[in-house]
Image (spheres, helix red, strand yellow):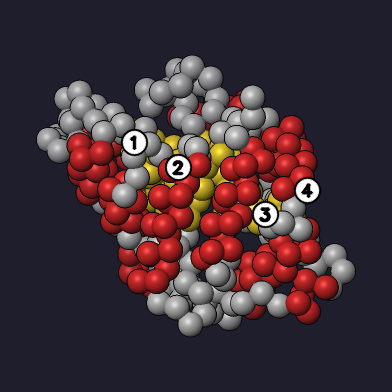
Amino acid sequence: MRVPLSILDLVSISEGSTAKDAIEAAMSAARLADTLGYERVWFAEHHNTDGVASSATSLLIERAAAQTERIRVGSGGVMLPNHAPLMVAEQYGTLANIFGDRIDLGLGRAPGTDGLTARALMRSSGEPQEFARNIYDLQGWFGPEGKAHTIPVSSAVSQGTEVPIWVLGSTVNGASIAGQLGLPFSLASHFAPDQIDQAVSVYRDAFTTESPTARLEEPRLMAGINVMVADTDEEAQLQFTSVLQMFQGIATGKRQKLQPPTKELASAPGVVPNHPMLRVSAVGSPETVRKQLDAFVDRTGADELITVTYAFDPQVRERSLQLLADLWF
């Protein structure tokens, strides 16, 4: 039995398209994933980014959950420093009341944007102790009494929903926090490949069931990986150049929408997908990608993979999702 596959969606906006187009494409992909057997689809929070429309995760989750039947839908994640924890409890409690046990709350400590925008958004601290306290209060608001553990504040709309909380992270620090809290950990290895092995080890070593926030009997690791599947290795590498251009833009500070694939980049030796931030990628034909995914699972011991697939053409993305499901499930 292979581990479950999930999807992380940043709702990328392609050059020549609008945010509305990107949201419609994301909903189409969610509907397809629901029928194909993916475990969950999560939406990532980003701000002040021209090529991304995933700023209001709770609204995207509501829309996707309303258009699907089986798949879990959640945040990958809510960047907690940008939000008042009580408001998060109320939003996700409302979602759970509407859609039942299909809603996930992934929480991150980073702002998901640049420093100036982070200051405009800041509502709470990302410091480990406050982050842990906020999680403890969120669990109280989601619990049977609907009351925070550290302050005398109640939330009727989230009471009894028991929305599961995941901790997101890209380093050993995030891994350590997730383990010490006894919570599932989602590792952002799809863009932060440098500390994968150390983070996995730290999470498992730090994991405890003794914390008041603990909700697991044993560690649960989800690891991120970029994926592009096409009929041939060459076609997949061509389509992946859109991702490569995006990450080159991040490195140079050039913000732009997702660009069309380019044959010049695809033909450059050793370029795709060996960008420093994209080393954790599975790009190629179904057989090539199957081997790459199997190797990544063997390396990390992940209990689940969360895949990230950017494509300039939404139909290319959906074709990749279909081929990936065919080779894995």
Mark 4 against mark 1, which lies toward the viewer? Answer: 4
- Tell whether label 4 touches label 3 (CB within 8 Å): no
Residue named by callout 2? 35
How many residues crowd mark 2 within 10 Å: few (<14), some (14–19), many (20+)?
A: few
Q: Position of residue 284 (x, y in %)?
A: 74, 55
Q: Is residue 211 left or right of residue 243?
A: left
The image's mark for residue 328 is none
Residue named by callout 4? 288
Who's the residue at 51% across and 65% down the image? Answer: 314
Count of numbered marks = 4
Residue named by callout 1? 102
Q: Amino acid at mark 1?
A: Arg
Q: CA distance from mark 4 to mark 1?
A: 32 Å
Residue named by callout 3? 229
* Residue 282 or residue 328, whichever sits in front: 328
Q: Which quadrant is home to the C terminus?
A: top right
Q: Secondary structure at mark 1?
A: loop
Q: Amino acid at mark 4?
A: Thr
